[in-house]
């Protein structure tokens, strides 16, 4: 039976300590393959000096190349959002059903294992292994491992630590212009140099760049392009109507984040976060992505801005009492540069004159379109429509 190990880490960057750990365990346990799994890092946790996920992945590939027993997986990075080890292991064991699995963690992580999400399931799927880290108490590790063993968990603790290297120290040295070549696997120093990684000054990166990476992975070409266009258009409207341009841009980027996600995964997210679909939503699955998108942003990407979440949440249906940002994203979805429908130019001109009139026009269009196709109309859309018609009749001027 093939013996395989999962070795997850930020690998920012991967260093000789990581490779030595993998080599050591492969040797001591007779592992056939160690899968390096760079973890996805949610945007709110990204520090300015961090390398992009693609770079972390590429450096792992460079480091693994000379070692036939080392492989690299992009599973967690491609999945996007926080990944639980239990899910990754489940996917891997399904992919390699005949293998015996090991889970490699550094000493700092090993002693927290019992508190990991669904630890019992993790322990059923894999033998838990660790290598002491410089400064960790080997005896404490062994005691922890003995407690686990007493509970019937399979574990393994290597005796000797590997080189006392950390990615943090490497990043700090690189930022200070010092060489770290001796701590890096062959080829990785050249890679870092070639891409100028870890030398970036603080504000050179921003979260929108990270969000673009995430939606790029989650959306098809057409939808990705559309999202960029809606972001630009939302920014333009924000400038025109006095809203926060940066927030409008971000909301535009993210509004369709779940649009290309399959039904089953969308339902899973709704279930995970206890979100219910109303009667109309149950019938019309095209409406799900707005609700699921807001939930994904809030719970997985940890976006905390309620106004932004609501702009995503209501971008398809609208609702009564919409905020300026909600209206902007709603309208931008109709007037973005990529949109092609017969009177798009008129709607764009109108959007320059009155956001409210554009809202009425687009909601009217949406309702007619749905009626024409015999589809249900979401009550929030009707509420948005009625509110405006009433205002118009009473002569209200609602443009900000
Ligand atoms: P950072 O300083 O950014 O936390 P790191 O060097 O700890 O980086 P990670 O990507 O966090 O690297 O490491 C993945 C796993 O490898 C972690 O579980 C970590 O504890 C372990 N590890 C990293 N370096 C060593 C080392 N020198 N000795 C033992 N374990 C290590
Ligand atoms: Mg670490």
Image (spheres, grey):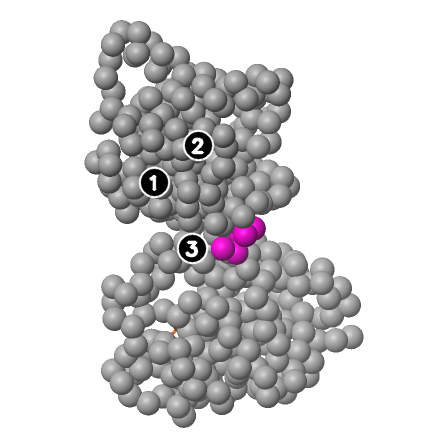
Judge the density around disc 1: few (<14), some (14-19), many (≥20) Cα neighbours within 10 Å: many
Residue at 23% x, 17% y is 397
Residue with the mark numbered 2: 344
Residue in the foreground of this view, choosing between 19 and 333: 333
Percent position (x, y) of residue 325?
31, 34
Q: Residues within 10 Å of mark 3 (few under 14, many from 20)?
A: some
| Relative depth, front residue between 236 and 273 | 236
- Residue behind mark 1: 234
**Residue 279 appears anywhere in the view:** no
Q: Quadrant of residue 304?
A: top left
Q: Is residue 65 above or below residue 91?
A: below
Name the residue rendered at 74%, 70% in the picture: 99
- Residue at image point 45% right, 28% down: 343
Mark number for residue 212?
3
Question: Which labelled disc corresponds to residue 276?
Answer: none
- Residue shown at 55% from the left, 60% from the top: 78
Highlighted range, magenta: 216-221
Choose between 52 and 105: the one closer to the eye.
Answer: 52
Query: Based on the displayed image, in which of its 4 quarters is residue 103 positioned?
Result: bottom right
């Amino acid at each position: 039976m093939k013996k395989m190990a999962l070795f997850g880490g930020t690998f920012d960057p991967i260093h000789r300590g990581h490779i030595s750990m993998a080599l050591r365990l492969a040797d001591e346990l007779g592992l056939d393959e160690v899968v390096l799994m760079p973890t996805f890092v949610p945007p709110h946790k990204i520090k300015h000096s961090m390398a992009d996920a693609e770079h972390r992945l590429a450096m792992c590939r460079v480091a693994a190349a000379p070692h036939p027993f080392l492989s690299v997986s992009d599973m967690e990075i491609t999945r996007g959002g926080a990944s639980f080890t239990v899910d990754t292991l489940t996917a891997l064991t399904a992919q390699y059903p005949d293998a015996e699995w090991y889970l490699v963690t550094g000493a700092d992580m090993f002693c927290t294992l019992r508190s990991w999400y669904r630890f019992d399931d993790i322990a059923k799927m894999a033998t838990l292994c660790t290598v002491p880290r410089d400064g960790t108490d080997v005896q404490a590790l062994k005691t922890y491992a003995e407690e686990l063993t007493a509970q019937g968990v399979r574990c393994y603790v290597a005796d000797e630590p590997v080189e006392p290297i950390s990615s943090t120290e490497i990043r700090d040295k690189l930022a200070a212009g010092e060489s770290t070549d001796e701590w890096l696997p062959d080829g990785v120093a050249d890679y870092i140099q070639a891409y100028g990684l870890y030398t970036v000054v603080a504000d050179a990166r921003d979260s929108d760049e990270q969000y673009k990476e995430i939606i790029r992975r989650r959306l098809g070409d057409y939808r990705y392009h559309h999202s960029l266009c809606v972001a630009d258009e939302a920014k333009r409207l924000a400038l025109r109507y006095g809203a926060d341009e940066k927030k409008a841009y971000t909301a535009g980027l993210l509004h369709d984040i779940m649009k290309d996600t399959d039904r089953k995964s969308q339902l899973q997210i709704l279930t995970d976060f206890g979100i219910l679909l109303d009667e109309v939503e149950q019938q019309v699955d095209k409406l799900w992505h707005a609700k699921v998108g807001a939930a994904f942003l809030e719970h997985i990407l940890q976006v905390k801005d309620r106004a932004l979440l609501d702009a995503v949440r209501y971008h398809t249906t609208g609702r009564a009492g919409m905020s300026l940002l909600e209206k902007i994203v709603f309208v931008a979805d109709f007037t973005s540069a990529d949109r092609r429908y017969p009177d798009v130019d008129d709607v764009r001109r109108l959007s320059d004159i009155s956001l409210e009139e554009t809202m009425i026009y687009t909601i009217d269009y949406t309702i007619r379109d749905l009626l024409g196709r015999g589809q249900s109309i979401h009550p929030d859309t009707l509420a948005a429509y009625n509110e405006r018609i009433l205002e118009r009749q009473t002569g209200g001027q609602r443009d900000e």
